[in-house]
Amino acid sequence: MRRSTIKDVAERAKVSLKTVSRVINNESSVAQATRARVAQAIAELDYEPDPSARNLRNGLSSVIGLVYDNPNPYHIIAMQKGVLAACRETGFALQIQPTDSTSPLLADELAEFVQRSRLAGLVLTAPMSERKDLVDALAERGIALVRIIAATEDPDDGLCVYVDDRKAAYEITEHLIQLGHRRIGFLWGGPQHRSSGERHAGYEKALKDYGITVDKHLAVPGDYTFDDGFRGARRLLALHEPPTAIFGSNDEIAAGVLAAAKSAGIDVPYELSIAGFEDSPFSRQSWPQLTTAKQATEAIARQAARLLIAGLRRHVYADNPTPPRNQGFLPQLVVRGSTAPLRPRSTPAKPK
């Protein structure tokens, strides 16, 4: 017969997967009646977590995993440094696993990674961390995890570190508007990343709040890469009425915009202002240096790993009575030489 899963327990008890997980981990936030109903369902179904999860609860592992799928090498390196810092502080070791976030077998692949490497849990980065189906499937397998996600507030559905990309993008767009720009282009990052949509939402909201009509032709799809920044900028600059400023969803995109502007002989920032996002080395190595939103990627990853380890110590090792609390981050606007006030267009002199 098929072994019962945590999903079977949730359906039998008529509760969420997270509630079952909280009961299994003996968290105090579950009502007594709900706890009794879940316990009864567990008994009736003879449910047991899979062997790897049982090992973790017996305290047999002090290794965590970092899972990523991101084309930006600077972002990946910063994530690795942050998680490693938390591991060194707490005596944990780290396994790093690049993945294909589009794989239909990703949940199985990650479960195998956890079991093979005998991991205590996973730090899950975007876009995997923003896939509810994947998060639920990993929870069903009893895998402890913390998510790094783009969100304006704490979603309160498990351990996570959330980054308010929307507000930061609003502040970047507002900066460009206050410089006098009204036609502001926007270059998307990968649509599978919630951060890209959050940054676009902040861009649109700033335009609307300042009474500027949103022109859909000024928003160009793409991915978080230099090449897409270059191609997207060429497309915007070829418009009959091109933008006077372009906001790239990350610094790599913005660096591609800068290259496109220089190849077309456009003076940055006086003929075209450019802004990026993240404050990666791209923003500081470009000339002029890029206006951006400083995202503390290393600190975000470090805090995510701390949350995961604190949760493990509370539920697995039973040596941390204080429940870990989710934390939010807001990237900060950094103004540099790639943005400037809109230069009034010169008009030809009237003949006398």
Image (cartoon, rainbow, N blue to C red):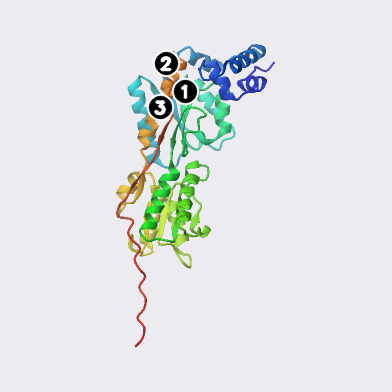
x, y percent for residue 111: 54, 24
What is the total number of numbered labels drawn onto the structure image? 3
Disc with the residue nearer the chain's start (2 vs 1): 1
Which residue lies at the image location 50% right of the left edge and 30% below the top edge?
A: 156
Whether residue 258 is visible: no
Alpha carbon of mark 1 to alpha carbon of mark 3: how far?
Answer: 10 Å
Report which residue position mark 1 lands on. Answer: 121
The answer to whether 231 is drawn above or below residue 195 in the figure is below
Report which residue position mark 3 lands on. Answer: 305
Label 2, secondary structure: give it.
loop
Mark 2, Cα crowd under 10 Å, few <14 / some 14-19 / many 20+, is: few
- Give the left or right position of residue 333, taking residue 239 as reference: left
Q: Residue furthest bottom?
A: 352
Which part of the image, by quadrant, shows the C terminus?
Answer: bottom left
- Give the left or right position of residue 7, taking residue 163 as reference: right
The answer to whether 32 is drawn above or below residue 258 in the figure is above
Q: Nearer the viewer, residue 122 or 39?
A: 39
Alpha carbon of mark 3 to alpha carbon of mark 2: how far?
Answer: 18 Å
Which residue lies at the image location 52% right of the left edge and 14% below the top edge?
A: 54
x, y percent for residue 157: 52, 29
The answer to whether 192 is drawn above or below residue 155 in the figure is below
Q: Nearer the viewer, residue 147 or 15?
A: 15
- Using the image, tell me which numbered label, if any, was put on residue 321: 2
Label 1, secondary structure: give it.
strand
Which part of the image, by quadrant, shows the N terminus?
Answer: top right
